[in-house]
Image (cartoon, helix red, strand yellow):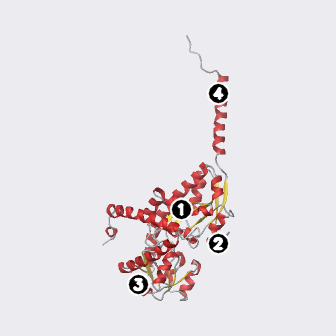
C-alpha cells in the first residue's frame, strides 16, 4: 500500500503563501515598533579633536547601524547651531532634542555636575567612575540631578586624566604658583587662586595667542591627546602631569525629557547600547592617544614633568577645603560627593591590594 502524500501541490502552495503572509505580518509588527528619529545634535567639542571630540562620531555611527538607520543623529560642530555653553538650556527647552557635551560646562548653575563631569580634584579615575556609575548609585543620582531640567542624561564617553598644564617656567614647589596668570576652569581653578594664581577663563581658540603674547603664563585644557591641537608645544617648553584637578573626563548625551519618554523601549535601548559602546571606545582611544602624545611632546623638545609629591599634597589639602565649602552650600553636591567618597574608600582598598603598584610598570 502506497503512503498518502501529506500535501498535494495546491495545498503546498497555499501553505507557502500563508507562511509568507505571516512572516510579513511579523516583520511589519517589528518594524512598526522602531521609531524614526531624525535629530540635530549640537556638540561641545570639534568632532576631530582626539579623545574628547571623536567619540560622538562613533556613537552616531553605532546607533545608526544597530537601528537600521531608523535613528539618525546629525552632528553640528560647536557654534554651528548654538555655542557649547547653551546645549543644556536648548535641550531642556526643546529647541533641540539632544546634545553631546561635557556636563562640567554647566557647573556654574549646577555645582554637582563637577562630580559627574570628573571636574573634582583627586576624584574618581575612569575604572572607579564606571563601576560607581553603572553598578552603584551614579546613574540614578545623575538622572535625579537633571530632573528639574526635564533632561535625560546618558553617559556616552569617558577619557583618562587631563594634563596639569603648560607653564612658561619650571614648577618645583607650590611657591612657584604665586603670581602666575593662568587659564584654569572649575574647582581646580578655585584651588589655584588660593595658591596665589590669577585665574582667567579663556576660550580654547585663544590659548596660543595669549601665551605667545605673554598675556598669561600658563594654561590647562584637556588630556595630552587633545592638547597638540592647541599648538602649545611650539611656544611653551614645560608640560606637567598628573591631572590632579580632573582624574577623568566624562562625556554625555543629553536628551530632552519629553522626547525620551516618547521613544519606544527598543529605540531607547539602541541609544543606550550605542552610548555604552562609545564609553569603551572613548576610554581605549584616550589611553592609546595619550601615550603617543607624551612621546610626541618629548620629541618636540617639551620637558614633560610630574609634580612632586609635596606639590600634590599641598594641592590635595587645599582641594579638600574648597570641595567641603561647596558641599556645605549645595545639598545635591554633598549627596553625590558622599556617595563617591564612600565608593572610593571601598574601591580603593580593592585597587590597592588587587593591582600591581604603578611603579612596577615603569622601565628601569
Which is more N-terminal, label 4 or label 1? 4
Q: Is residue 159 visible?
A: no
Q: Name the front one of labels 4 and 3.
A: 3
Q: Name the front one of labels 2 and 4.
A: 2
User: Which residue in the structure is indicated by mark 1?
Assistant: 142
Q: Foreground residue, 282 or 220?
A: 220
Q: Which mark is residue 150?
A: none
User: Could you say whether the residue bearing mark 2 is in a helix, strand or loop?
Assistant: loop
Q: Name the front one of labels 1 and 4.
A: 1
User: Which residue in the structure is indicated by mark 2?
Assistant: 83
Q: Foreground residue, 133 or 231?
A: 133
Asked if 61 appears above or below 24 in the picture, the reply is below
State the separation of the CA atoms marked 1 and 4.
54 Å
Q: Name the front one of labels 2 and 3.
A: 3
Q: Residue at x 58, y 78 (%)?
A: 203
Q: Name the front one of labels 3 and 1.
A: 1
**Residue 185 place in picture, x, y as percent:** 53, 77
User: Which residue in the structure is indicated by mark 3?
Assistant: 174
State the separation of the CA atoms marked 2 and 3.
36 Å
Asked if the residue under mark 1 is in contact with the one under mark 3, i.e. CB atoms within 8 Å, the reply is no
**Residue 329 place in picture, x, y as percent:** 52, 73
10 Å crowding of disc 2: few (<14), some (14-19), many (20+): few
State the separation of the CA atoms marked 4 and 3.
84 Å
User: Which residue in the structure is indicated by mark 4?
Assistant: 15
Q: Residue at x 66, y 41 (%)?
A: 28
Amino acid at each position: 500500500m502506497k503512503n498518502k502524500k501529506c500535501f498535494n501541490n495546491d495545498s503546498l502552495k497555499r501553505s507557502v503563501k500563508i507562511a509568507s503572509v505571516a512572516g510579513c505580518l511579523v516583520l511589519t509588527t517589528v518594524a512598526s515598533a522602531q521609531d524614526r528619529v531624525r535629530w540635530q545634535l549640537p556638540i561641545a567639542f570639534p568632532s576631530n579633536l582626539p579623545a574628547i571630540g571623536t567619540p560622538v562620531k562613533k556613537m552616531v555611527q553605532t546607533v545608526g547601524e544597530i537601528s537600521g538607520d531608523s535613528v539618525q543623529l546629525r552632528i553640528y560642530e560647536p557654534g554651528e547651531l548654538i555655542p557649547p555653553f547653551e546645549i543644556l538650556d536648548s535641550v531642556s527647552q526643546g529647541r533641540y532634542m539632544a546634545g553631546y557635551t561635557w556636563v562640567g560646562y554647566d557647573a556654574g548653575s549646577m555645582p554637582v555636575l563637577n562630580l559627574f563631569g570628573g571636574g573634582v580634584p583627586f576624584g574618581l579615575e575612569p575604572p572607579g567612575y564606571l563601576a560607581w556609575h553603572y553598578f552603584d548609585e551614579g546613574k540614578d543620582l545623575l538622572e535625579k540631578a537633571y530632573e528639574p531640567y526635564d533632561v535625560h542624561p546618558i553617559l556616552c564617553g569617558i577619557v583618562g586624566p587631563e594634563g596639569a598644564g603648560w607653564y612658561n617656567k619650571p614648577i618645583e614647589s607650590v611657591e612657584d604658583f604665586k603670581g602666575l596668570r593662568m587659564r584654569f576652569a572649575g574647582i581646580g581653578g578655585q584651588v589655584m587662586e588660593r595658591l596665589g594664581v590669577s585665574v582667567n577663563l579663556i576660550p580654547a581658540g585663544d590659548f596660543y595667542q595669549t601665551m605667545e603674547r605673554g598675556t598669561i603664563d600658563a594654561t590647562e585644557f584637556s588630556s595630552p591627546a587633545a592638547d597638540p591641537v592647541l599648538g602649545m608645544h611650539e611656544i611653551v617648553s614645560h608640560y606637567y602631569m598628573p591631572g590632579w584637578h580632573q582624574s577623568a573626563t566624562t562625556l554625555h548625551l543629553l536628551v530632552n525629557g519629553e522626547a525620551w519618554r516618547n521613544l519606544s523601549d527598543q529605540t531607547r535601548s539602541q541609544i543606550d547600547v550605542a552610548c555604552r559602546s562609545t564609553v569603551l571606545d572613548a576610554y581605549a582611544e584616550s589611553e592609546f592617544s595619550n601615550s603617543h602624545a607624551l612621546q610626541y611632546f618629548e620629541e618636540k623638545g617639551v620637558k614633560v614633568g610630574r609634580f612632586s609629591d609635596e606639590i600634590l599634597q599641598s594641592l590635595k589639602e587645599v582641594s579638600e577645603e574648597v570641595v567641603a565649602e561647596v558641599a556645605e552650600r549645595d545639598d545635591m553636591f554633598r549627596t553625590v560627593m558622599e556617595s563617591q567618597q564612600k565608593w572610593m574608600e571601598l574601591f580603593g582598598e580593592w585597587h590597592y591590594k588587587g593591582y600591581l603598584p604603578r611603579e612596577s610598570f615603569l622601565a628601569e
